[in-house]
């Protein structure tokens, strides 16, 4: 391939990626509008959600929606079952008011009145994460193999983090390098201020649905670059004076409680800013924040002995949100399922 052909190819590929990104935005907005329309117009007769992946290649849940212009205006019937058990499954009546209060009109799984009470506790006096932190998806390079190497050198001086490099409270290890100045970026966050901000929380942006833990985050204390399989959290410009300890915030995001909350709302491999931004964050006083932050710092300093510290952090988060002992079992069943 000649130099001119190669240039033309990369221009064409970049155009295709831009069109794809625009199409994804359009589809996302249409999905939101469609959900809003069928809920506000009271068009649902019933919803059947199949438990588990129906197809071998599936990465989201499969559901059947029965729509009608003569549906019950108060609500509809919902169930979760397996394909061979539809005729004998138990349906639950769900009111439209449950979904009208959702920012994006998500129709989430029904898990019983106890879980609904827990969700109420979570959002009461909490602030959505999107109001506290800007959630930025990492950069997309023209070609990873073209600009990334496994050895650091003068030509490839800058460490860059992939989603697979992020573990729960695991210190970052640099295994890939590139050049911020010389690389060609065709998508994602391109503000160097985002990458160089420290400390900042990094969260895996893609998680397989077969994994029980949906949210996995760690701390970047050096201001590192990251690729498009990672979300980075940086402060937002807000008139509201919310002082949040970064390690305290990481404890909430990584907690079993937030994992259960996220799993109950979203069945997708992508942890987008729209989804993560809805996490309800309690802004505790300075002393509480510092006590919880200290536990997180202890985990980073005592790798290999995290289990008891994780339990202690979870207990602290449960107390923070007013969760009772009887409710913890429900939360952990959702989180670990």
Image (cartoon, rainbow, N blue to C red):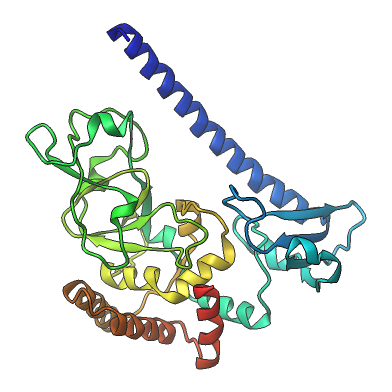
* Residue drawn at 73 percent across, 67 percent down: 81
**Does any portion of residue 126 appear in the rendered image?**
no
**Does any portion of residue 12 appear in the rendered image?**
yes
Quadrant assignment, res 267: bottom right
Looking at the rendered structure, the number of numbered marks drawn on it comes to 0
* Residue drawn at 56 percent across, 32 percent down: 23
Give the percent coordinates (x, y) of residue 44: 82, 57
* Residue drawn at 27 percent across, 70 percent down: 247
Q: Is residue 310 above or below residue 68?
A: below
Q: Residue furthest bottom?
A: 325
Q: Is residue 186 above or below residue 75?
A: above
308 left or right of 278? left
Q: Nearer the viewer, residue 178 or 50?
A: 50
Give the percent coordinates (x, y) of residue 321: 46, 82
Q: Nearer the viewer, residue 201 or 146?
A: 146
The quadrant the C terminus occupies is: bottom right
Give the percent coordinates (x, y) of residue 104: 61, 55
The quadrant the N terminus occupies is: top left
Q: Is residue 310 above or below residue 275?
A: below
Q: Is residue 12 above or below residue 254?
A: above
22 left or right of 219? right
Q: Residue furthest left?
A: 154
13 left or right of 87? left
Give the percent coordinates (x, y) of residue 243: 29, 69
């Amino acid at each position: 391939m000649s130099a001119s052909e190669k240039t033309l190819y990369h221009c064409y590929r970049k155009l295709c990626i831009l069109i794809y990104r625009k199409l994804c935005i359009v589809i996302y907005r249409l999905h939101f509008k469609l959900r809003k329309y069928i809920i506000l117009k009271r068009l649902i007769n019933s919803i059947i959600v199949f438990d588990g992946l129906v197809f071998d290649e599936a990465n989201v849940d499969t559901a059947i929606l029965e729509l009608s212009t003569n549906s019950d205006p108060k609500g509809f019937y919902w169930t979760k079952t397996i394909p061979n058990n539809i005729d004998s499954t138990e349906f639950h009546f769900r009111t439209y008011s449950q979904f009208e209060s959702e920012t994006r009109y998500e129709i989430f799984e029904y898990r019983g009145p106890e879980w609904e009470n827990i969700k109420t506790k979570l959002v009461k006096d909490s602030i959505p994460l999107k109001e506290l932190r800007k959630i930025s998806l990492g950069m997309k390079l023209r070609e990873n193999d073209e600009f990334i190497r496994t050895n650091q050198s003068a030509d490839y001086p800058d460490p860059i983090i992939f989603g697979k490099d992020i573990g729960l409270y695991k210190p970052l290890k640099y295994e890939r390098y590139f050049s911020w100045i010389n690389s060609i970026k065709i998508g994602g966050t391109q503000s160097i201020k985002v990458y160089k901000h420290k400390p900042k929380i990094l969260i895996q942006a893609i998680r397989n649905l077969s994994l029980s833990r949906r949210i996995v985050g760690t701390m970047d204390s050096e201001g590192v670059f990251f690729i498009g399989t990672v979300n980075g959290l940086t402060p937002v410009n807000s008139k509201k004076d919310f002082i949040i300890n970064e390690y305290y915030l990481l404890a909430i995001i990584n907690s079993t409680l937030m994992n259960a909350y996220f799993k109950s709302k979203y069945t997708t491999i992508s942890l987008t800013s729209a989804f993560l931004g809805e996490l309800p964050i309690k802004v505790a006083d300075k002393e509480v924040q510092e006590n919880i932050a200290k536990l997180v710092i202890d985990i980073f300093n005592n790798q290999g002995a995290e289990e008891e510290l994780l339990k202690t952090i979870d207990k602290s988060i449960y107390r923070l949100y007013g969760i009772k002992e009887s409710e913890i079992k429900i939360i952990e069943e959702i989180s670990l399922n």
